[in-house]
């Protein structure tokens, strides 16, 4: 039934409504005998029911009971909601209607329930223009909207209702309804809708209180909407609204959650400049901002300000400690934790958990364990997640004893491990090689592990054995896993016969109580270990066992096997495995082809190498540079330069353009055998094939021309380097200086030396040695000594080769005494002279008539075992010197005795010196 109300007030309202109807120009309540056609049925029912209960009027010709029953049945509306449906939507009816003391207050809640029912049961799009919603929209109040928003369980329904309410005539959201919607969207992490809401609020000109603005800013800040936070705050300020300390605190708190510390600093300065005093919450927000970006110096300054004001609490400490832990400053974080004790403060449970995870992440498990014990002392619960992270951290540090002790403590405290932790712990002990402990853990806690997890554990066993060099044991264990399947099959057959089945128990390194089929990972671990230990045959046998069990090989296994076969020069087997690989449905990759290609190159098999390149190219793969470069170098070193060039031409014809390294190797080979014309042709072909020869390639050609005495052509190559914009290297200049010196063009060598210095290419000891040798060959010993001194002044220390060149050069120029001085200097620097130097000095002093000094040098040479062998080119020079010494009357007897003692190889008497001596 319709609620009992004062009919007089309702009739007055109905009368006003009926006056608005154009078909009723006179007193409708006294003239109407049948329902007016323009009057809504619901309003008519209300009219009828009201007339029925009124003591002022009565209607005899209507049947209200029949009309109400039919209406409710057709519309599925209860009696108690009939009154709500008849509430009008007219300009004369204000939204303060229910404030009328003549109406019952519970009708507001009825309206809210009806709206909630409609929106909750119709989450999908529905007719917003329906008559029912139009009537309900006319009843909306701010309080009703705010209550409904908070009551909806779905953010989507709440948002739909919020938008619908804003479209109702005469209704306008205020700051509280906006904030209710903002809170809902924030909790649902709907950033896009939250952005739109903040802009709509600003555009609507909705007035804000400081508290309401602070709440909205926090909602936006929780989702990291920094730009929207600033936009809303600045708009509020532009409306002549003055923010207070609370509003600024909310703003700083929101900004602090981002990494925009610059905004926090500017807003904090703005707040202080406006005369507002910062409080504990202000400084805490600034502290959070500095901590987030790792500005520890600034963080400590703010922390000191908070401390000086007596505002330090657990939250402030937690911010600083957690941030220090996050940025790896574990020691500083621990120091602050100890400082908390002086303030009689303790970290809360959540912060301790964060720190334990953070310290473990920074590999500071020892510090994490201290905090873990602190949690126990404070009575906080320690869950599986904390135990797990610490146990895994200890395992990573290979502190397995501590990890096991903590694991036992965990179970004793009533915290039971999950599958992940059991698997991690068993795997760690397996990898470490402690199979005894792994077995014990498997028996105690691994019985409930499924087959896939057990396979992971056994793979860890295999990996641990391989890593510890126990490849044979790994090989045996994977066979034990295969045997478990056979055993299970046998047990199943027996069970079918006798009706009783039992588990699988295999004698192996790790307990096997279930049939476990090794997977590709299992075989790959063992096969890879066997191959690394060069046990290729065992690896192949295991591979065939794997295929025989129906476990398909993978690309990695095929590649590893083919590579090791190729490394062992087992080329035919490699090709056979390659065919099997293709038949199994695996396409060879670049690695596969290059393993075989490298083997062909090492064998110098150019024809088959080119054939394989043809196949590789057809599949879109390229041969590796290192392989064909090695082949070219190998052919050139063996004097097969023509074959090397033909191979390169074949590569070009197949579309596999060799790079500069391969071309340079061929050019170098041609230069070594003096084929400079062909070397120059290949050099020119490099540019044709879209390669720009680098300085190294140019240097090879320059060296070849210089070696052939064609220094002018070498100079032309140097000019090309400069024309191409390349920068000549020190090697380039050294080659040219050596070339000019050997052709006697010292002037051009010195000119090249000057260009070298001008181009900021510091001369090396090779440069100076070449010039010294060139000057001596040109008969300019004084210039050679001048260059030698210049080398020392530039801080370039002469080496053994430089001393030998100077001493020998001075000897050739007849400057034996000076040469002897540098010879002694060389010995003082512990630079060992060779036979060449001794022979040169001996002959130089003999030419000066100083036989005694020459003989002393001879004896020194013999004492230092520097005497040349008969095959040495210096041997004949030494024979000439001995003859001259023997012919000298002053020392002839000494020389004869010296020879008689057998000090000179192949010479046992003076008769061995030759015919001239015998005749004399």
Image (cartoon, rainbow, N blue to C red):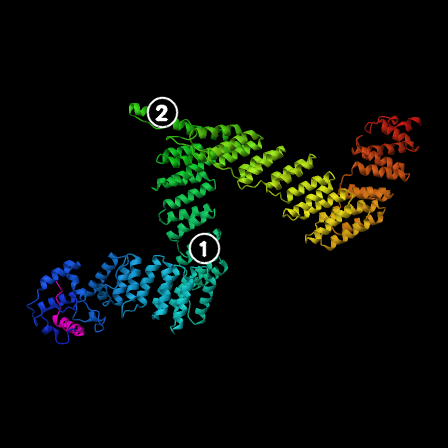
Q: Secondary structure at mark 2?
A: helix
Given this view, does label 2 or label 1 mark the residue nearer the observer?
A: 2
Q: Nearer the viewer, residue 536 or 43?
A: 43
| Most common SS among magenta residues | helix
Percent position of residue 98, x then y: 20, 69
2 or 1: tag closer to the N-terminus: 1
Percent position of residue 324, x then y: 46, 54
Q: Residue at x 34, y 57 (%)?
A: 188
Q: Secondary structure at mark 1?
A: helix
Pick the quarter of the image with the C terminus. Answer: top right
Residue ID for mark 1: 323
Q: Residue at x 31, y 58 (%)?
A: 156
Q: Is residue 832 left or right of residue 302?
A: right
Percent position of residue 373, x then y: 40, 46
Please say whether residue 277 is visible from this viewpoint.
Answer: yes
Q: Which label number is shown at residue 766? A: none
Q: Find the residue positioned furthest to the bottom.
A: 26
Residue 50: name its quadrant. Answer: bottom left
Image height of 308 relative to 872, above or below = below
Q: Is residue 234 left or right of residue 684?
A: left
Image height of 385 relative to 128, above or below = above
Task: Write the start and end of the magenta stretch as one range.
Answer: 1-22
Residue 486: name its quadrant. Answer: top left
Residue ID for mark 2: 490
Residue 60: name its quadrant. Answer: bottom left
Q: Is residue 400 left or right of residue 855?
A: left
């Amino acid at each position: 039934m319709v609620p009992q109300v004062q009919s007089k007030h309702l009739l007055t309202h109905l009368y006003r409504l009926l006056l608005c109807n154009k078909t009723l120009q006179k007193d409708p309540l006294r003239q109407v005998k049948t329902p007016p056609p323009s009057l809504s049925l619901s309003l008519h029912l209300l009219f009828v029911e009201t007339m029925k209960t009124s003591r002022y009027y009565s209607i005899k010709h209507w049947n209200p009971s029949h009309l109400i029953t039919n209406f409710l049945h057709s519309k599925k509306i209860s009696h108690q909601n009939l009154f709500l449906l008849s509430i009008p939507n007219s300009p004369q009816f204000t939204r303060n209607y229910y404030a009328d003391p003549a109406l019952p207050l519970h009708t507001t809640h009825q309206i809210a329930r009806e709206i909630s029912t409609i929106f909750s049961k119709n989450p999908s799009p529905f007719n917003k223009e329906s008559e029912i919603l139009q009537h309900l929209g006319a009843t909306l109040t701010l309080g009703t909207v705010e209550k409904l928003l908070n009551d909806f369980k779905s953010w989507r329904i709440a948002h739909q209702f919020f938008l619908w309410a804003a479209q109702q005539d005469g209704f306008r959201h205020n700051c509280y309804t906006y904030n209710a919607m903002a809170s809902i969207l924030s909790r649902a992490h709907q950033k896009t809708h939250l952005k739109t809401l903040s802009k709509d609020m600003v555009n609507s000109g909705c007035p804000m209180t400081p508290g309401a603005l602070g709440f909205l800013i926090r909602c936006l800040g929780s989702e990291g909407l920094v730009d929207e936070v600033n936009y809303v705050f600045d708009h509020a300020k532009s409306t002549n609204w003055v923010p207070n300390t609370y509003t600024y605190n909310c703003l700083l708190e929101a900004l602090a959650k981002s990494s925009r510390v610059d905004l926090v600093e500017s807003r904090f300065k703005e707040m202080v400049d406006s005369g507002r005093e910062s409080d504990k919450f202000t400084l805490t927000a600034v502290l959070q901002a500095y901590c987030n970006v790792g500005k520890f110096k600034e963080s400590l300054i703010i922390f000191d300000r908070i401390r000086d004001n007596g505002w330090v609490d657990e939250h402030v400490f937690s911010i600083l400690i957690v941030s220090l832990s996050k940025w790896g400053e574990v020691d500083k974080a621990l120091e602050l934790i100890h400082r908390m004790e002086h303030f009689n403060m303790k970290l809360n449970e959540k912060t301790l958990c964060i720190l334990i995870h953070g310290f473990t992440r920074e590999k500071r498990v020892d510090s994490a364990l201290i905090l873990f014990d602190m949690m126990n002392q404070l009575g906080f619960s320690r869950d599986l997640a904390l135990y797990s992270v610490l146990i895994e951290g200890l395992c990573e540090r290979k502190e397995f004893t501590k990890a096991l002790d903590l694991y036992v403590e965990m179970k004793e405290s009533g915290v039971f491990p999950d599958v992940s932790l059991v698997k991690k712990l068993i795997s760690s002990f397996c990898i470490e090689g402690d199979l005894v402990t792994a077995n014990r853990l498997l028996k105690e806690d691994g019985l409930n592990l499924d087959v896939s997890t057990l396979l992971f554990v056994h793979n860890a066993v295999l990996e641990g054995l391989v890593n510890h060099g126990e490849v044979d044991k790994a090989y045996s264990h994977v066979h034990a896993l295969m045997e478990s399947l056979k055993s299970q099959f046998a047990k199943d057959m027996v069970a079918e016969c006798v009706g009783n089945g039992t588990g699988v128990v295999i004698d192996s390194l790790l307990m096997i109580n279930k049939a476990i089929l090794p997977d590709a990972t299992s075989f790959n671990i063992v096969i890879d270990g066997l191959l690394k230990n060069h046990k290729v045959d065992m690896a192949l046998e295991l591979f065939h066992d794997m295929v025989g069990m129906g476990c398909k090989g993978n690309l990695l296994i095929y590649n590893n096997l083919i590579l090791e076969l190729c490394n062992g020069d087992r080329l035919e087997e490699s090709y056979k495995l390659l065919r099997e690989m293709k038949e199994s449905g695996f396409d060879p990759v670049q690695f596969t082809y290059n393993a075989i290609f490298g083997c062909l190159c090492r064998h110098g098999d150019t024809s088959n190498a080119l054939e394989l390149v043809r196949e590789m190219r057809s599949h879109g793969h390229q041969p590796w540079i290192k392989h064909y470069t090695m082949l070219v170098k190998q052919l050139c070193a063996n004097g097969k330069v023509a074959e090397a060039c033909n191979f390169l031409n074949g590569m070009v014809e197949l579309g596999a353009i060799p790079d500069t390294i391969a071309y340079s190797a061929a050019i170098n080979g041609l230069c070594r055998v003096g084929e400079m014309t062909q070397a120059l042709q290949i050099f020119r072909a490099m540019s044709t094939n879209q390669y720009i020869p680098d300085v190294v390639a140019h240097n090879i050609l320059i060296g070849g021309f210089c070696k052939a005495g064609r220094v002018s052509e070498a100079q032309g190559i140097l000019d090309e380097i400069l024309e191409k914009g390349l920068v000549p290297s020190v090697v380039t200049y050294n080659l040219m200086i050596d070339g000019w010196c050997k052709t006697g063009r010292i002037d051009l060598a010195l000119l090249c030396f000057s260009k070298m210095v001008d181009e900021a290419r510091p001369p090396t000891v090779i440069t100076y040695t070449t010039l010294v040798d060139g000057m001596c060959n040109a008969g300019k010993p004084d210039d050679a000594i001048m260059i030698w001194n210049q080398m020392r002044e530039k801080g370039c220390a002469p080496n053994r080769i430089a001393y030998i060149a100077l001493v020998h050069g001075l000897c050739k120029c007849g400057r034996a005494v000076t040469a002897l001085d540098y010879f002694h200097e060389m010995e003082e620097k512990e630079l060992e002279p060779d036979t060449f130097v001794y022979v040169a000095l001996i002959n130089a002093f003999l030419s000066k008539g100083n036989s005694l000094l020459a003989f002393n040098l001879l004896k020194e040479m013999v004492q230092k075992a520097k005497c040349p062998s008969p095959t040495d080119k210096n041997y004949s020079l030494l024979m000439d010197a001995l003859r001259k010494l023997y012919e000298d009357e002053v020392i002839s007897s000494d020389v004869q005795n010296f020879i008689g003692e057998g000090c000179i190889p192949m010479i046992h008497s003076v008769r061995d010196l030759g015919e001239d001596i015998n005749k004399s």
